[in-house]
Image (tube, coloured by chain):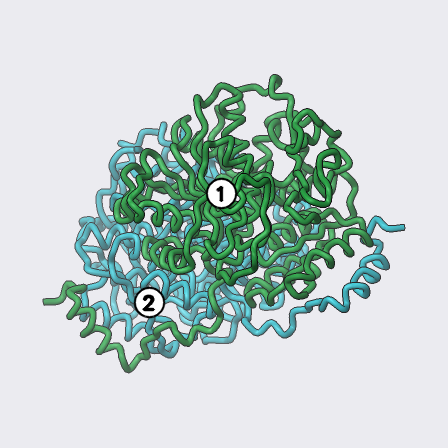
Chain colours: A green, B cyan
Amino acid sequence: MAGASLAIGQRSLGDRSKLFPLLPVLTEGCPATSDAEMQYPLEIDYAYDRVDPALFDQPPLPGLARWAPLLPPLAPGLDLGEGGTALVPADDLGRALGFTGRLLLKDESRNPTWSHKDRLNLCTVSTAILSGAPGIAVASSGNHGAAAAAFAARAGLPCVVVTSEGPQPSFRRLLAALGAHVVLTDADNRWPVLRRIVAATGFMPASNLTRFHTGNPYGPEGYKTIAYELFLQLGRRVPDSVLVPTGYAELLYGLAKGFRELRLLGLADRVPQLLSAEPAARGPLARAAGSNAAAMEVAPEPSAAAGIACTVGGYRGIVALQESHGRALTCSEAGMAEMQARLARHGYYQEISGAAGLAAGAEVIARGEKLDGIVVAILTSTGLKDGPMDVSDVPVCAAEEVEALIARLQAEGETGAP
Amino acid sequence: MAGASLAIGQRSLGDRSKLFPLLPVLTEGCPATSDAEMQYPLEIDYAYDRVDPALFDQPPLPGLARWAPLLPPLAPGLDLGEGGTALVPADDLGRALGFTGRLLLKDESRNPTWSHKDRLNLCTVSTAILSGAPGIAVASSGNHGAAAAAFAARAGLPCVVVTSEGPQPSFRRLLAALGAHVVLTDADNRWPVLRRIVAATGFMPASNLTRFHTGNPYGPEGYKTIAYELFLQLGRRVPDSVLVPTGYAELLYGLAKGFRELRLLGLADRVPQLLSAEPAARGPLARAAGSNAAAMEVAPEPSAAAGIACTVGGYRGIVALQESHGRALTCSEAGMAEMQARLARHGYYQEISGAAGLAAGAEVIARGEKLDGIVVAILTSTGLKDGPMDVSDVPVCAAEEVEALIARLQAEGETGAP
């Protein structure tokens, strides 16, 4: 509908003068600038001078193929109606948290497998198909594996998901239903197993193969569409800042790049400040940013935020923060848990990781700083995925206790009875 | 944004000449035409001559307030970004199932609590607020309770969910997180408990209080928006038929009414044929339709389709089928389970009930009948809600079995290795 992809090659983030062809997919970082010490990712570059600005005259509906000129070549028929997620005002919550401007929530749980990862995997699975890979392989503790498995299923390609802890029962059943081969191993062994599978089968990796994160160059391109949607949902303007739950910083980078493109195309006059939000227990990006490093490795301190608790970062995060004059925030475990509960009391039941952006923003405000203007918090995934399955702590009222419940509701002044 | 509601009153489906004021909400059916034998529901009527057809010049984005003139008065700020769900072509699946025309999937799992019920509960909770009710009460085994609890949370109103079986752990945690009071009782006792709570507290019932289903007259109005969205998503045309998972037929009725309104407003020249899909084990609507009854009660034969396995129907289903020259289909338990698996292999992980529409359609075709033209199947809710939590039957590959997995993938010709 929107014309063909204008992608021209894979550009190194280690040295932007280096442009590699679109294929083969460089799944182990930029070969010209990476070594054993540090690995630099790549991004997809486009013939921007050929982009018709009328591309942005369309409404931000689902189906990312509508952004085809600014995405890698997409495999036909792979569409699951991804994207086009709701942006919802949360001024009441914002005021309660001390936001001085407007707060809006971008609800990425409204995707085909109920997380933002669908946007990434549309691109990686498309790339696998177009490069002739016979399958998809991914190391993931959750959303990423589900999204890869869904698009692989849609494409009729086999998918291997290498996971460390036993996924939640509901999640394991999801992967099985989507037809994925699930490999269970310990945390340290995930990447060696992934490498072995990729080497032996030729499957396209949808996640990382290097020490510092480089990932699949095609993946973060899918996240650019969140920036495009925000621009249109806000009435052709960009927000002042965006709170972004951050693991390997692919989402952060995709957002930065999308906003960069909007400015490049003359549609926006500035880019928003991006605020990355990592669990304080880990936070490799915050530590790298704080010490002017390209990437850092940190100890595997415990964190409940399974979707974003990473021990290594990658250079994409640093670039995204630099480009957006951004800040690397962290949030406490208690802060994330409290924000998860608070969001639910406003109607949004998010995974713990999905509450990290808003939790980090709230911690900044609680320290006496201000978050002014239009602030968007990205919510990444449904809470149905990561709640503990032992619900013995969840209160339930038996039928014989109904009168006591009624009395309690009446005492709380919560009823219309006299 | 779209102007005020044009609602004028509650009109009886038992006798359409009877129009009652908008308030009080008639939560026990039409008082003029109901008796102990049969209870007739009501719908909301509008000043259709005052509807600006330009209402339908907007894109079908999330946020049902955009349809305000054709909805009951909505409480300000209750928006969770509901609706605006993706319509995705599934021609490959359609061909495999023997559809001779086009098959498209309307994925209602892309709502704030991941089911179509959000559309209904925006309306019932709005109505509670505008009528001054101090809370919400609902009998539900799943989606309905979650959606009611989410909108009640957003509104700051207490919500009681009366449920029969222990909900899935993930689901029970969802209800608790949303702040609902969960009452657990046996199936027969749900409605007496609900009645007692409503009587004692003045809470607004978001579900049914009568023997045959009448429900909350305001609820099905929210489902009309699916018809509006389909009309726009198909390029200002209506589909030829719609496959609708059907329990109490509120969704079916909302769809029928939405399409009726599009014709009334001169936007569409016909209404699609609606095909209700009930579990064959119950199927009160199919039995009522087959015996020219206004509603039927059936035995509680076992069914895995918790969302739609009802023992009583209501008159709305009959009206919807009559208006649309529709058909009451049923589907076997095996057919639903197989369709759930099949949808997942196409990337859509649905609850069992959500696969019922397509399962019923496939059974019709398997009998040698045709479903021509543009067919839309409504998918109602995420599969994350109702899978069994015992996953000991779900295959997982241990790390030491990876070589065997690789060999298996190679033997299946699924790899690019030589």
Which element type, helix, strand or loop, lies under badge 2? strand
- Above or below, B259 relative to B24: above
Q: Position of residue A156 (x, y in %)?
A: 72, 50
Residue B74 in sight in this render: no
Q: Amino acid at mark 2?
A: Val
- Above or below, A244 relative to B170: above
Relative placement, left or right, of B83 versus A407 is: right
| Chain at tag 1 | A
Evaluate whether label 1 is on the same chain as label 2: no
Give the crowd class for mark 1: few <14, some 14-19, many >=20 residues within 10 Å.
few
* Residue positioned most to the right: B418
Calculate the distance from the C-alpha at mark 1 to the C-alpha at mark 2: 49 Å
* Residue positioned most to the left: A418
Residue B175 in sight in this render: yes
Foreground pick, A321 / B14:
A321
Q: Position of residue A383 (x, y in %)?
A: 46, 58
Foreground pick, A415 / B28:
A415
Relative placement, left or right, of B400 versus A313 is: right
Q: Residue at x 59, y 40 (%)?
A: A294
Q: Residue at x 66, y 55 (%)?
A: A139
Q: Nearer the viewer, mark 1 or mark 2?
A: 1
Give the crowd class for mark 2: few <14, some 14-19, many >=20 residues within 10 Å.
many
Which element type, helix, strand or loop, lies under badge 1? helix
Q: Which residue is mark 2?
A: B161
Q: Amino acid at mark 1?
A: Gly
Relative placement, left or right, of B167 versus A20 is: left
Q: Which residue is mark 1?
A: A290
| Chain at tag 2 | B
* Residue positioned most to the top: A49
